[in-house]
Image: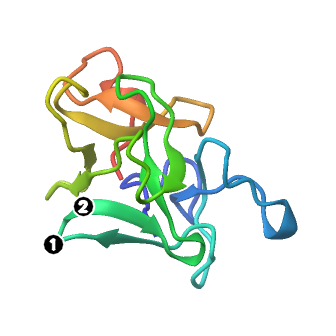
Amino acid sequence: MLRLQDDLDDPLGYCIDVRGFGAGIRLDADLQAHSCKSGAPDDQSFAIAGAPAHGAILLIEYDLCLAVADPGPGAPVLLRPCDDPSVSRAFELLADGRLRLLSEPDVAPPELCVGVAGGSGQLSFAAVFDPVNHENNQGL
C-alpha cells in the first residue's frame, strides 16, 4: 500500500486507491486518496518494480503501473500498461517518504511528487518547494 504520511482526518489513514470496487472498478479513471483498507485489497496493493526504491510502481492484481500522461504540477495520477511509452511511469521513494516522479530530459520539471489536493482527495503532482501548495500536498 502507498499510504500518506499524515493521517489527516481519518484514523485509518489515506492510501492511493483505484476508484470503484469489484465489477465496478474504474482502472481508466484518475487515482484517488481513500481510507486505507485492511488486509491486502486489490485496489490498493502496489509494489515498486525496481532496485530498491525506484522504478515503476505496479498495481499487482491488475498488472498496471502508476503513470502521468502530461508531467507537470496538477497532473492526475493514472494507471497505464507498464510498457506504454506515451506516459511517464518511473518513480523514486525518497527517504522522507515522498514519492517523486523521476524526470526525463525535456519532459518533466524536476522535483514533482505525488500529493493530495486539499479537500478533494484527488491525487496530483505538486512542486515540492512551491510555498503556495506545500501545506496542501501530503507526501506518501
Helix or strand or loop: what does disc 1 sit on?
Answer: loop
How far across and how far down the image is residue 135, in percent? 35, 28
Marks 2 & 1, CB-CB < 8 Å contact: yes
On residue 51, the disc is 1
- Locate residue 53 relative to residue 8 in the image: left or right: left
Q: CA distance from mark 2 to mark 1?
A: 7 Å
Who's the residue at 67% across and 44% down the image? 29
Is residue 63 left or right of 41 when viewed as pictured? left
Q: Secondary structure at mark 2?
A: strand
Question: Number of numbered discs present?
Answer: 2
Q: How is the image coloured?
A: rainbow
Look at the picture and state if 50 lies above or below 55: below
Give above or below for 140 relative to 133.
Answer: below
Residue 115 pos. (x, y %): 40, 38
Residue found 38% across the figure and 45% down from its top:
85
Residue 116 against residue 83 in the figure, above or below = above
The amino acid marked with disc number 2 is Gly
Q: Position of residue 18 (x, y in %)?
A: 64, 56
Residue underneath mark 2: 55
User: Which residue occupies the foreground of this view, 140 or 92?
Assistant: 92
Farthest top residue in view: 132
Front one among 79 and 15: 79
Up-down relation of residue 119 to residue 13 (above or below): above
Q: In the depicted view, which residue is nearer to us: 136 or 126?
A: 126
